[in-house]
Amino acid sequence: MSFENQALSDRKKLILRAIVEAHIKLGEPVGSKYLMQEGRIPYSSATIRNEMAELEELGYLDKPHTSAGRIPSELGYRFYVDTLVSQYDAKTSEAKELKKMLSVKMSEIDKILDNATKVASAMTNYTALSLRPRPSSIAIKKYEAVYLDTRSYLIVMIAQGTEAVKTKRVNVNFNINPDEISALSKVLNENLSGVYVDGINIHLMMSMNSQLSELIGLNEELAEELVSVTVKSIYETMNELGSEIKFEGVNRLLEYPEYKNLDKLQKMISTIENKEDIIRAVSTIDQSDDDTKIFIGSENMVKIMDDSTLIYKNLKLNGKTIGAIGIIGPCRMDYSKVLSTIDQLSDEISKLSDIGSLPSAKNEEDEE
């Protein structure tokens, strides 16, 4: 159910916001009595209960077991994040600590992301991650397309230099046959072998379309679609190969009851240690996008994170994306504080250009 077509009354918004913030604080179901006494909701207990019941019917709240209280649903958290969350007022001491911990010389630019990850975890008390820039010096030496069935095939890629082997299953919404996939292998190797990420462009793809169409007499429209979906998958894989991800504060997960289930915790830690699933998920985010992305529960591409929230933002310096910072925590995370912290980090990093500039090769020679 989508909230976009529903207009909540101001009273419902007030109660929903109070429940979300109380649940973030307590980690327990929230009842009408608590809202009256601690949430300062100026309505009778009966009125609050009726509104809570209606919010539950609309999908914004869940009622766990036989408890009289309610907890926010994914939809409730999403509505809160998009329309109700207030700006967190950082204390002066927190702002100073953030600047102090983040402070680096421009000549130590490689340390910026490491510091930012430590700051983000320390200030929010959640697990933080940083993704380093995806270099353009990634190329595939050899390709092989393997036919699976009429709607899917596998691309096997051997990375140039590292000899790392990556596979990518590609699903299509049109019928394919073994001859077409065999021809695709030939076209990929002739056009993309040894080509770097930034060398894959529309002109190259148009050439591949024509070659594939001529090789097997494939309809030009289908050839274009097959090349397009293949190149998209290859591009994603090359980005994954060039990405480096680091985590800070993984042990902080233990502080939240959402991760007390030993089996779930082990799977979560295993996912973090293996990194590939999370790299694949965040690699789909456009590097040029300046907006903060929020993935709540099942919105996450990584299944084990269906009880977690990932907040993610690209970081820029001198107008160039130098990487990204993210926060992983329970769905009931303190969104206000996390969003504020990430925004502060982004702002402070963008100001680092004011404290100096990277030495040029000429200056280094002069100093010698």
Image (cartoon, rainbow, N blue to C red):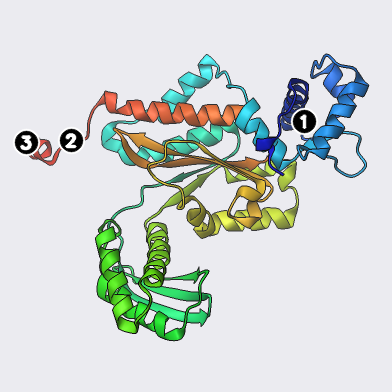
From the viewer's perspective, is 54 left or right of 119? right
| Mark 3 residue type | Asp
Q: As drawn, which residue projects farthest toward the bottom?
A: 179
Numbered disc 2: secondary structure? loop
| Label 1 vs 3, first from the N-terminus | 1
From the viewer's perspective, is 249 left or right of 190? right
Task: Identify the residue under disc 1.
Answer: 26
Task: Identify the residue under disc 3.
Answer: 366
Q: Position of residue 42 (x, y in %)?
A: 83, 14
Residue 217 vertical placement versus 88 (above, below): below
Nearest the viewer among 154 and 91 is: 154
| Tag 3–tag 2 contact (CB < 8 Å) | no
Q: Image quadrant of residue 136?
A: bottom left
Nearest the viewer among 307 and 296 is: 296
Whether residue 183 can be seen here: yes
| Label 3 vs 2, first from the N-terminus | 2
| Mark 1 residue type | Leu
Answer few, some or many: residues within 10 Å of disc 1's Cα (few below 14, many 20 plus, some between 14 and 19): few
Q: As drawn, which residue projects farthest toward the left?
A: 366
Residue 188 vertical placement versus 285 (above, below): below
Q: CA distance from mark 1 to mark 2?
A: 51 Å
Q: Nearer the viewer, mark 1 or mark 3?
A: 1
Task: Identify the residue under disc 2.
Answer: 359
Answer few, some or many: residues within 10 Å of disc 2's Cα (few below 14, many 20 plus, some between 14 and 19): few
Q: Image quadrant of residue 255?
A: top right
Whether residue 193 can be seen here: no
| Tag 1–tag 2 contact (CB < 8 Å) | no
Q: Look at the image and tell me in which quarter the C terminus lies.
A: top left
